[in-house]
Image (cartoon, grey):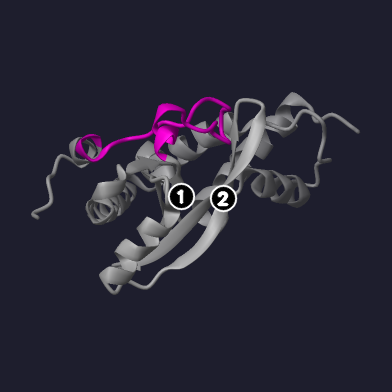
C-alpha cells in the first residue's frame, strides 16, 4: 500500500479536522477516509493519528469559532451536569469531547455510570417517566475488548448517552480511541469547576 508524503499528511490532518468540526461525523477513521478521498490521496499506511487530528480540531475551533464554540461547550457541560444529577446514585463521570472541549453541534454528552445491575439504571428512568433507548458500546481495556450496556436520553435538545459499567469499573478506565491512554473521567464537582457555575438544585 502506497505511503503518503509529509505534505499530503499535513493536508489530510487539516481536512479530517474540518470534516469532524463542520460535518455530522464523530468518527476519526471515517473522517480520515473521507479526507483522503476528497483530496485524491491514497489511503496509505502512514495516515495521521487520531491525536494529530484532534489537536487540529482544537486549533480550528479556537481560530474560526471563538466565542460561539465556548458557548456551545458551556451549554453541553450544563446539560451534562443536569444528567449527572439525574444519575447521581450511579457515580456518574463525564468523558469524551464535552469534557475535552472539542465538542461540535453534532456531539452527544457521554457519561460513564457504575452499577452491578444495569437494570437499576433503567428502573430509575422509568420511575421518573423519562423515555430512553438502550444499546451497547464496545471499549478496550488493556489487551481485551468488552461490550457494556448503554442508555440514551434527550434533554433540552441534547442527546445524553450513558454507558453502564460494573461498580468496580470505577477503578479502571477504558482506553481512549484517540490516544490509547486511559480515558479521562470527571466527577460532577470537576464539571462544575470547568464551567465556573453550580446549577441550582
Q: Residues within 10 Å of mark 1 (few under 14, many from 20)?
A: many
Is residue 188 located in the magenta-colored stretch of the structure? yes
Q: Is residue 154 left or right of residue 12?
A: left
Residue 6 magenta-drawn?
Answer: no
Element type where label 1 sits in the image: strand
Q: Main secondary structure of the magenta part?
A: loop
- The label on residue 163 is 1
Q: Position of residue 10 (x, y in %)?
A: 66, 31
At 38% from the left and 65% from the top, the residue drawn is 153
Residue 48 visible here: yes
Q: Residue 96: percent from the left, percent from the top?
A: 44, 41
Instruction: Specify whether 174 is left or right of 188.
Output: right
Q: Residue at x 43, y 62 (%)?
A: 152
Quarter occupied by the C terminus: bottom left
Picture quarter with the N terminus: top right
- Asked where in the image residue 141 lies, by quadrant, the reply is top right
Q: Are marks 1 and 2 in contact (CB under 8 Å)?
A: yes
User: Looking at the image, which residue sits at the far right?
Assistant: 1
Q: Determine whether, in the image, residue 15 is placed left or right of residue 57.
A: right
Q: Which residue was labeled with disc 2?
A: 137
User: Residues in magenta?
Assistant: 167-190
Nearer to us in this view, 85 or 51: 85
Marked residue nearer the N-terminal end (1 or 2): 2
Spatial CA span between label 1 and label 2: 7 Å
The local secondary structure at tag 2 comes to: strand
Confirm whether residue 158 shows in the render: no
Amino acid at each position: 500500500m502506497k505511503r503518503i508524503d509529509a505534505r499530503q499528511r499535513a493536508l489530510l490532518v487539516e481536512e479530517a479536522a474540518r470534516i469532524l468540526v463542520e460535518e455530522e461525523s464523530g468518527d476519526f477513521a471515517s473522517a480520515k477516509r473521507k479526507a483522503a478521498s476528497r483530496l485524491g490521496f491514497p489511503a496509505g499506511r502512514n495516515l495521521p493519528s487520531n491525536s494529530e487530528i484532534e489537536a487540529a480540531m482544537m486549533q480550528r475551533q479556537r481560530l474560526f469559532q471563538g466565542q460561539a464554540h465556548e458557548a456551545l461547550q458551556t451549554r453541553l457541560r450544563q446539560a451534562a451536569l443536569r444528567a449527572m444529577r439525574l444519575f447521581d446514585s450511579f457515580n456518574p463521570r463525564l468523558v469524551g469531547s464535552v469534557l475535552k472541549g472539542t465538542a461540535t453541534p453534532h456531539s452527544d454528552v457521554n457519561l460513564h455510570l457504575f452499577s452491578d445491575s444495569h437494570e437499576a439504571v433503567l428502573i430509575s428512568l422509568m420511575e421518573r417517566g423519562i423515555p430512553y433507548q438502550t444499546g451497547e458500546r464496545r471499549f478496550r481495556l488493556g489487551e481485551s475488548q468488552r461490550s457494556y450496556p448503554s442508555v440514551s436520553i434527550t434533554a433540552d435538545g441534547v442527546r445524553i448517552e450513558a454507558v453502564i459499567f460494573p461498580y468496580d469499573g470505577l477503578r479502571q478506565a477504558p482506553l481512549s480511541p484517540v490516544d490509547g491512554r486511559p480515558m479521562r473521567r470527571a466527577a460532577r464537582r470537576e464539571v462544575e469547576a470547568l464551567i465556573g457555575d453550580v446549577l441550582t438544585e
